Image (spheres, rainbow, N blue to C red):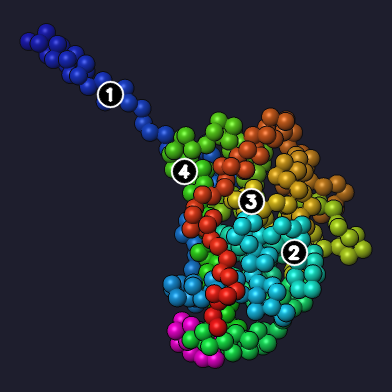
Amino acid sequence: MARVWFHLIIGLLLLSPVVFAEEPPVPPITTSTSYSLGPVQVGNLSAAPIPPGNPQSGAKIELGKKLYFDTRLSKDNTVSCATCHSPSMGWSDEGPTSKGIDGQRGGRRAPPVSNSAYNPLQFWDGRAPSLEEQAKGPIENPVEMGNTHQAMIQTVGSIPGYREEFLKVFGTSPVTIDQVADAIAAFERTVVTTDSPFDRYAVGDDGAMTPLEKKGLEIFNGKGHCTACHWSGHFSDGRFHNLGVAQTDPSKPDQGRYDVTNDPADMGAFKTPTVRDAATRPPYLHDGSEKTLEDVVRLYNLGGGPDDANLDPLMVPLQLNEGEIKALVAFMTRAMTSVNPEVSNVKPIPQSELPR
């Protein structure tokens, strides 16, 4: 009898080799402890947060999109939100700093609108607490749109097509600056870049990234020290850091976050930008002083710029070799670039097609 049971068990083992040979599936990197070196590990983006006071609707988003591309919000009808935050330029501009009315140049690079819904604070110095407040700023900035809120509202409110749409969306009249800001912010919250090779890899598609890009991700999470500031699905901590970037004009230094907080610890500190789609919007840093991603990596490899007494303590020499620099740049260049057509294929609305 024992001999019969022995042969039966052997037969079952031979008939079911997969059951006993199969290895457990490799967990996606969002749950893998090997990729959790940052304060919050990198991974896929969650849904964009929506403030209770400004719920999304299709009509509001469409209205906000029209306002976003409308140059009539500016004093001389030449500048729109998209002038400095163009879909074709990674939702930023050609830089190094942004150009407003009368050809004036601002002192900072245009931060991307893409994924800005995930920023707890807006602008390089964090002076705006929401997308709604951010949308109001450029309108009355003398270097950007050069208008006033009152004059802009008079212009928009004088356009029958806009009056009709605002009444449909908000149910009240006349048009207000808060309504304009709410609509623009609602559109901007739809500009979320997902479906990059990294995002596919993060949920288990091992072939989505090349071996070189995988090496770059390993460096990003390890020796490159990148996740000290570029973490979570947004690839940014939303905080402010001094990288030791040399002042463009030492006689008029840009004090960054300090101008908002008056805290000496914030002197020369600027918000951490997202790494997502970074390859689509050179040049880099708050002043556009680094032309390529490789230039940025080399700055970090040195431990930041020289001779800055307020250099962030997270900035330390990395000692990356040339191969490691190449891998890290490869990861940020292709693996972090979205192929989401809902965002990458957004086209400007021609002025002739805007409300009249």
- What range of the chain is rendered magenta? 165-175
Q: Which mark is residue 18?
A: 1
Circles 4 and 1: CB distance less than 8 Å? Answer: no
Q: Which residue is mark 3?
A: 280
Taking depth in this image into account, of 74 and 181 the one nearest to the observer is: 74
Q: Which amino acid type corresponds to the residue marked 3 in the rendered image?
A: Thr
How far apart, in angstroms, are the residues tagged by discs 2 and 1?
A: 60 Å
How far apart, in angstroms, are the residues tagged by discs 4 and 2?
A: 34 Å
How far apart, in angstroms, are the residues tagged by discs 4 and 1?
A: 27 Å
Q: Which mark is residue 200?
A: 4
Q: Nearer the viewer, mark 4 or mark 3?
A: 3
> Residue 198's x, y, as percent?
52, 43
Q: Which residue is mark 2?
A: 98
Q: Which amino acid type corresponds to the residue marked 1 in the rendered image?
A: Val
Q: Residue at x 89, y 60 (%)?
A: 249
Task: Determine crowd level at label 1: few under 14, some 14-19, many 20+ residues with C-alpha closer than 10 A.
Answer: few
> Residue 132's x, y, as percent?
59, 74
Residue 234 in which image quadrant: bottom right
Determine if the magenta segment contains residue 134. no
Q: Can the viewer see residue 88?
A: yes
Most extreme residue toward the left, as rendered? 1
Residue 146 in which image quadrant: bottom right
Give the mark, 3 or 1, whose residue is nearer the N terminus: 1
Give the mark, 4 or 3, whose residue is nearer the N terminus: 4
Task: Determine crowd level at label 4: few under 14, some 14-19, many 20+ residues with C-alpha closer than 10 A.
Answer: some
Most extreme residue toward the front, as rendered? 352
Most extreme residue toward the right, as rendered? 251
Q: Nearer the viewer, mark 4 or mark 1?
A: 4
How far apart, in angstroms, are the residues tagged by discs 3 and 1?
A: 45 Å
